[in-house]
Image (cartoon, rainbow, N blue to C red):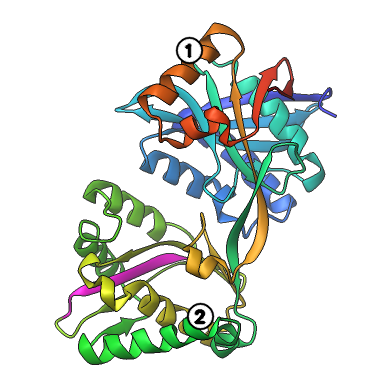
Amino acid sequence: MTDDLTCRIFTGRTQVAAVAPTVEAMRRAYGLDADMTTDMRWFVSRTLLWGNSPVVVLVNQGAKPVAAVLLYQRRYCGIPTGVIKGGNGSGDGVVVAPLSLRMAALQVALAKVLLLPLTHTILVAARGIDAQWRARDVETNLSLAGGFEGFLSRLRPRSRRNYRYFRRRAESELGVVFVPTLTNAEALQAVKDLQGVSMFPVPRARAMRFQAAIQATPGSFSMGVRDESGRWLSYIAGWRHAGTTFVEWQLNHHEFASASLSTVMRTYFLEHEALAGVSEIVFVGGTSAALARYCKPDCCFDIVAVRRGVRGLVVKKLVTRLRPHSQLALQLRGGLLQQQVTGSKVEEFA
């Protein structure tokens, strides 16, 4: 029930910093210490990294804070777009609450946020919620039970051969060397070398901010693979917590596509973590289809909330016409179960 829940909205870095201790206390109370995606430092740094503005909705039951919803306001060149988003591609983060309260907390929070001036659309992906939203499967958690050989034994025969073949080939033809622990200076240099020549290039300024945010994350790590001349070919980074390793991103040099550097790096990385006693790898935001098939399946729910009336109709027409292939446009055209917010409830509509 949502009748006894009330909300307060905190927007921008200063207001969010003021409510951060309250959110962190709830994280500890609800056993969410290992979920770095709801850690306030992590949440704020990633939000600012992409040029967006953090939005935290504190949900009270009576006078007691019982939940928090972590969202962000999309900005373009510093200008608010009217779009509020929450969660990454696999629905991580978003709600800090007991399992039984997550849906109710998110429901009242979305209704409140949609009333903010200029806000017209909310797009959220979340896990751990029982909702009548569009469900989709995500694969992010990879078991290392049985160590590296145990992992290999669960692969298809061809994939198992590839893991061994591409590593041997890279070592013999490129003289690759695996560096399991990079200093901050080495990590920054690897990112500088790879950010513009990777499979999915990232602007340098954004890459540097991203790397700085990773280095500031408790338990962070960076690994790399370089050739015999010292040139960085692949890079992987994330953090470790309580026997689990979280992978945030990986960069691979695009000139060596035939060498399958992603597989080479993955082989070194998984073997290293298995030997260190890590029981599970979590790929934050998801991983490649080739590896995802061996991850534990989970369910993620998506929602699009749009204001009623003329404003909502205009937004849908503009988005689908001007950015027809964007995530929001696909969802507004029916790729997701759409939801409409009225009063304090989220109601399904056709």
Q: Where is residue 198 in the image (x, y as percent from the top left)?
A: 26, 61
Residue 106: image quadrant is top right
Question: Which of the image's four quarters has the C terminus?
Answer: top right
The residue nearer to you, when weighing 185 against 98, is 98
Residue 118 highlighted magenta (yes or no):
no
Residue under pointer 1: 314
182 versus 5 height, above or below: below
Question: Which of the image's four quarters has the N terminus?
Answer: top right
41 versus 330 height, above or below: below
The residue sitting at 64% across, 57% down in the picture is: 33
Q: Give the range drawn in magenta.
A: 230-238
Left or right: where does residue 305 sit relative to residue 163? right
Q: Give the class, few, some or many, for how many residues have Cα within 10 Å of label 1's Cα (few <14, many ≥20).
A: few
The residue sitting at 50% across, 45% down in the picture is: 43
Q: Give the class, few, some or many, for how many residues have Cα within 10 Å of label 2's Cα (few <14, many ≥20).
A: many
Look at label 1 and name its amino acid.
Val
The residue nearer to you, when weighing 242 against 285, is 285
Q: Examine the residues drawn in magenta and state their main secondary structure.
A: strand
Residue under pointer 2: 273
122 versus 129 height, above or below: above
Left or right: where does residue 86 sit relative to residue 169? right
Look at label 2 and name its amino acid.
Glu
Residue 225: image quadrant is bottom left
Q: Position of residue 131 (x, y in %)?
A: 75, 39
The residue sitting at 49% across, 34% down in the picture is: 330
Residue 231 highlighted magenta (yes or no):
yes
